[in-house]
Image (cartoon, grey):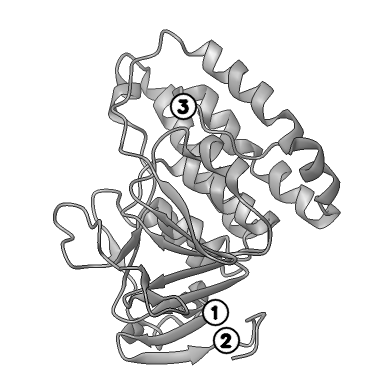
Amino acid sequence: MLSLLGKIMKNKLRSLFKETWLLVTLATVIGTAALVGMYYETYVEEYKRVNAEHNNKPEVPQLGGLTFAKIDDNLYTLTGEVAQGDCEKIVPLMPRDFTVILESPGGSLHDGACLAAHFKLRNVHTVVRDTPVYNEDGKVIYQPAAAAGKGFEGRVICASACSIMFLGGDNRYLMGDVWFGIHGPATPAPYLVGKAPNAIEQAAFQTAAGLIELLTQLGVEDEKLKLFFIRVPHQTMYWLKPSDFKSMPAISLLATHYRDFHGFTATHKMANLPT
């Protein structure tokens, strides 16, 4: 698997992992096991090294974790909260050139960023939709909001780290009255215990810098839009809505295809598929 991935890497995508190395540096600072910005051949080795350095760090409560499931030919779902270690768990299961339906309230930024980078490497199309998917026999193979978390009952959510994963898609579909949310990053509370103020400040700067670099490599060109992912307070959420597209046109570029997204339908010229 590792040797195969090494062969298929394109030169233009090597920079994606080099540029996002700042997120790996942050992982060392705050003690996570996230692995973003490295060549996949050294992925496992680096994972073990970073973990070994933090055996005595305070534990962070673990989320339930993402579930990656194949539901049809070249069609997958990725649902649940984003937990530490999800990228390492899911990447070996990924094929190339597939479509993934996302549904997640977010979680680990580092794992979400890592998965987004691997989506970009594999020419993935990302979808958030509020209608079921049926197979050829008429059987429902995807039911939206089936596992919505507390407070989101009945809603299809892709927010926080999920919004970063969504941006890893070459084509990105928002379909129906789905909730697409953005907010800024935050350091997990346990890692703030006993840390000097300047170390906390430096970690925050590294997080912001690494996230902006990653967004650039994922194709987000507008500087104000990139800052949106930093400036929205972590305790809040900006929910994408078509009524903002006129005042801030760049924000509409978060998706390449809108299909009745809160009443809005459009396809951007940047899309890579016929409409």
* Residue 209, image quadrant: top right
Q: Which x, y percent locates residue 114? A: 56, 44
- Residue behind mark 2: 268
Is there any visible trace of residue 39 in the rendered image? Answer: no
Q: Label 1 crowding class (10 Å Cα cut-off): few <14, some 14-19, many 20+?
A: many
Q: Which residue is mark 3?
A: 32
Residue 42: numbered disc? none
Q: Which residue is mark 1?
A: 256
Classify the position of the N terminus by image quarter: top right
Place residue 159 in its image quadrant.
Answer: bottom left
* 120 vs 216, nearest the viewer: 120
* Crowd rating for badge 2 (residues with CA inside 10 Å; few <14, some 14–19, many 20+): some
C-alpha span from label 3 to label 1: 32 Å
Say which quarter of the image contains residue 215. Answer: bottom right
Helix, strand or loop under label 1: loop
Residue 13 in percent (x, y) is at 76, 54
Instruction: Name the residue: 72% across, 37% down.
Output: 40
Amino acid identity at mark 2: His
Which residue is rendered at x = 26% and y = 64% of the image? 145
Query: How many numbered marks, from 0 up?
Result: 3
User: Mark 3 is on which residue type?
Assistant: Thr
Question: Residue, x 64% and y 81% (percent of image)?
Answer: 270
Q: Are marks 2 and 1 in contact (CB under 8 Å)?
A: yes
User: Residue most toward the top?
Assistant: 56
